[in-house]
Amino acid sequence: MQSVLACARLLARTALGLGTSLRQTSESREFRLVTASCGFGKDLDKPGNIVRKGMCFGDDACFIATHRLADVLGVADGVGGWRDYGVDPSQFSTTLMRTCERLVQEGRFVPSNPVGILTASYNEMLQNKAPLLGSSTACLVVLDRQNHCLHTANLGDSGFLVIRDGRIIHRSDEQQHYFNTPFQLAIAPPEAQGNVLSDSPESAEDAMFDVKVGDIILTATDGLFDNMPDFMILQELRHLKDSSYQSIQQIATKIAEQARHLAYDPIYMSPFAQHACANGLNVRGGKPDDITVLLSVVTEGGD
């Protein structure tokens, strides 16, 4: 009997050790994002051309950064109204994204706190001797490589989708003060402070999700979401062949091109037109706008 009990204890310890080993192996796996980008500026004479000034499409800007702890990406949409005051709206959004990118590359961030990245970037811009005037929405997505978690921060009407097995399992919520007036970071001249809409980076909606290999993350400015409903985006994503950069780039380009085409369709009832009608406005057609699309797939393994 003692021999039988001893064998049982040995088997239990062996099984426990095996389970621990499997768990450690699972937890030691690193996830990463393979990301491609595409975009269009709305002021192009030829809608088929892509303008890419660094990572800037019109007044939109974006970045894709890799660190040993995390993969981080972001989009920002410069508010075009500043052009009426002689200010280039793209400078604010581009500087915001470039600063976020540098902070990540320098390791000055915590993967679980994308709002902290946005706050540090904005504060650095405020502290410049000659502050850069303008305003912008912003959306940051961070994949924690070790913990397999996606951490997000969204301020305004840019946003992201998380797609698994052909279904949207997470979608960011728009932050609007009122129709077509999103939350935004801003730096205004002293004489205009109080008259310019400005939100705190801490107002960004933050979220955390577990992700799996094969999950798709689409991050974009409102130029996409105002022109393409979710079902159209999902239709394009069904053509994604694999997680290679070439395949992802092909689909990112198709999505951006489709949104660009719909933006100039005068009879199409775009999501923007539907929202306008819901707010008592008689609007029809697409919404010409800058479009930025970052398309990512969660994969397993190192760089």
Image (cartoon, rainbow, N blue to C red):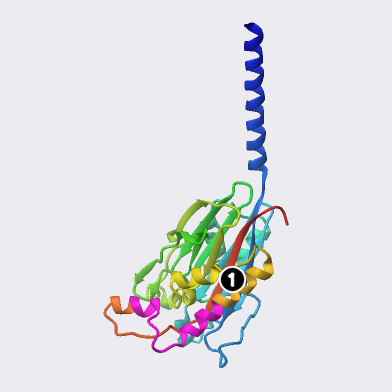
Name the main secondary structure of what is drawn in magenta.
helix
Instruction: Indicate yes or no whether the magenta region holds residue 271.
Output: yes
Q: Residue furthest top?
A: 1
Foreground: 256 or 80? 256
Does residue 270 appear left or right of residue 216 in this picture? left
Q: Residue 12 sits in which quadrant? A: top right
Q: Position of residue 91 (x, y in %)?
A: 57, 78
Which segment did they paint magenta? Answer: 256-275
Q: In the image, is residue 30 above or below residue 24?
A: below
Q: Position of residue 241 (x, y in %)?
A: 63, 66
Query: Residue drawn at (29%, 82%), measured in percent from left and top?
Result: 281
Query: Residue drawn at (45%, 61%), measured in percent from left and top?
Result: 171
Query: Residue drawn at (53%, 54%), measured in percent from left and top?
Result: 151
Quadrant containing the N terminus in the rendered view: top right
Q: How many marks?
A: 1
Quadrant containing the C terminus in the rendered view: bottom right
Residue type marked 1: Cys
Q: Position of residue 228 (x, y in %)?
A: 46, 75
Q: Position of residue 67 (x, y in %)?
A: 68, 56
Q: Residue furthest left?
A: 280
Residue 102 visible in the shown view: no
Foreground: 240 or 172? 240
Pointer 1: what residue? 62
